[in-house]
Amino acid sequence: MLKHSVCWGLDLGHSSIKAVKIARKGEVATVLGYAIEPIAVPEGGDRTDAVIAALRSLAGREEFHDTPVVASLSGRQVFSRTVNIPVINPKQVERMVELEARQQIPGDFDQVEWGYHLSPAPDGVSQDVALFAVKRELATEVMSVTRQAGINLVGISVSSLALYNFVRYDQVFPEDETIVILDVGAENTDLVCYQGDMLWMRTMGISGNALTDAFAKKFKVSVAEAETLKRQAGESAQADRILKVIEGTLIELTSEVQRSLGFYKQQNKDAKLENLVISGSTFRLPGLPEYMAERLRYTINILEDLDKVKVADGLEREHFMHDLQSLGVAMGLALQGIGFGRATVDLMPREEQFERLLRSKMWAGVAIPVALGATMWLSLGIVDGVKTENEMLLAKIKESYESNTRRQSESKSVLDQVAPKAVELKLFEPFGAQQGFHTGVSAAVLEVVQGIAHERGVIAGPPERGQPTPLQALYLRSLTIPEPDLTVKGPFRPLGTDVKVSLVVTIPQIARPGEISRLLVDRLKALPVPSSLLGLRADVRAARAANTAAEQEPRLFAAVQAQSETAGTDTYWYIDRSHTDPITGALAPLQEERRYPVMTVTIDCTLKAQETP
């Protein structure tokens, strides 16, 4: 069973990769980060190469390094079947399950990786065994693409089990109810039912791709264009028309769900089904959750908040909750990786699991052959020979111990010499990160502007077709950063002369520009020095060299002042891809330039030159 202190869950989807990083401290799970990376397969290109490229981009940007990762396989890639066995001695369960697996799993049993999840059966006197199997070459392929991307893969699970792990751990429901989970993915739909430890699941062929095909057929566009239309449907004012386009597919989906739940209720007469949890980006289609509630007659629960899992302070909670609907599988994988998952199926190749066990239990691995050797010695009665061999082994152990002691002493001596240099070398770490002066200053300023835009949220602009146009609180028009004078001190020393950074922003008149510009000035004044630019500050360099803290947190700019505020106008492009010709009814996308009043503000920020103490 996996039980890491920190783990990434990696949901390898059809069109994107979803990743969530969760840490455990005691009995508390906390989300540290997340990301959604699109998989861009060029026309005629290789999908595997595109997946590796996406994984590399994701792992590099989110700094995966050696952090353990648990990935998933979708239901269509995995053979699954539930069998029933009597309640027997726990020590005999694994052997009986393997015998069942050999009979149930098709093909060459030695060429598959398999696992199982045990749960009590509804009759109360037997057990249900959910078997899962995947071709070894597919599990090996997952290992290969993750390793090529530099990812430390420690487990492979199943998407339906991952979703169960997340909902079961985090979402709070009455204990006497059977909870239904419906996850509509790109290539298949997973249906999961659980009550307490009892678990039942089914994979259905109807998927998000079927909805995309319906869009493509109706609007006579390519699959890629149809996928774009589907993703932008949430921004369209024609929700009813969109549902009409895909109604046939939705009827087929809900009918299949009703048939599956009808079968489940036949097997579980006392099951109380009231709550249905929906998961997947497909349910972002306008009106779809309400449509499902009306057709299925269940209370629809949207994944839009967490009950038990915490969110780290450094993570933007609002953005994370907005994307949570698509992150259920990744959440469950990460929870399994830190030991909080009820289902612990791992389809990693057995050889890899064994090698990992040996690496983590090195002394146990040594003890096993020693114990086996002792047993053979007693059974064969070769006392003298083994005694001599053991004496030689002890001599080798003693020699190795003494050698390790000498090397440890030598290493300590080297470390004592290196330690004083480490602090000095630490000063050059930001420059080794290859982030230049312009990049460091630009990133810091852009972060301030973006932060204010996010805090203020969407501002209602001029009305378009009865709806206000969404605008930001402010827009960065230009950022001017002159070349610093590095000839006096050199690139690894403080600035030789002052550097004046100038930025121009436009603020919509309806957004109270005076208040926004004052807030921007205050934020720029409080902006700390980025780690990549600490080498420009003599006081920080001196404090680090002396291994002491600076008197106060260093600020990036010595002075920040608003120079001018000018009223004017700005433009934006109004685009309506769902617009139809009022006469012919044909799709006729609009693209028009519009204007709105703004206040243009110029702000000067000074990077102060400092003398080296």
Image (spheres, grey):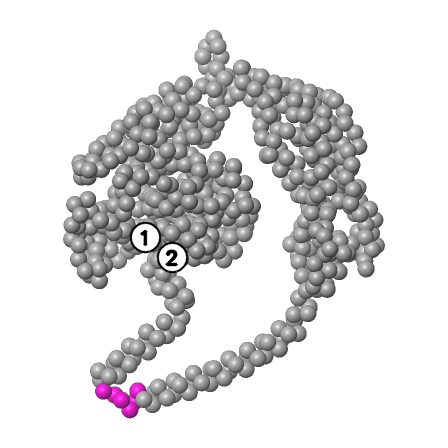
Instruction: From the viewer's side, name the closer residue of 70 and 272.
Output: 272
Is residue 415 shown in magenta?
no
Residue that appears at 78% across and 36% down: 561
Q: Earlier in the sequence, mark 1 or mark 2?
A: 2
In the image, 208 versus 365, the foreground residue is: 365
Numbered range of the magenta stretch: 381-386
Looking at the picture, how far across and down is residue 536, in whole percent?
75, 53
Task: Check contact, mark 1 vs mark 2: CB within 8 A.
Answer: no
Where residue 203 appears, as percent x and y from the top left, is 29, 39
Residue 2's tag is: 2
**Local crowd size for mark 2, using a 10 Å CA cut-off: few (<14), some (14–19), many (≥20):** some
Amino acid type assigned to the residue bearing label 2 in the image: Leu
What secondary structure characterizes most of the magenta part? Answer: helix
Pick whichever, 533 or 205, lies toward us: 533
Give residue 314's position: percent from left, percent from top.
56, 46
Question: What is the count of numbered marks?
Answer: 2
* Residue that carries the numbered disc 1 in the rendered image: 345
Image: 499 above or below 492: above
Q: Is residue 246 left or right of residue 101?
A: right
Identify the amino acid type marked 1: Val
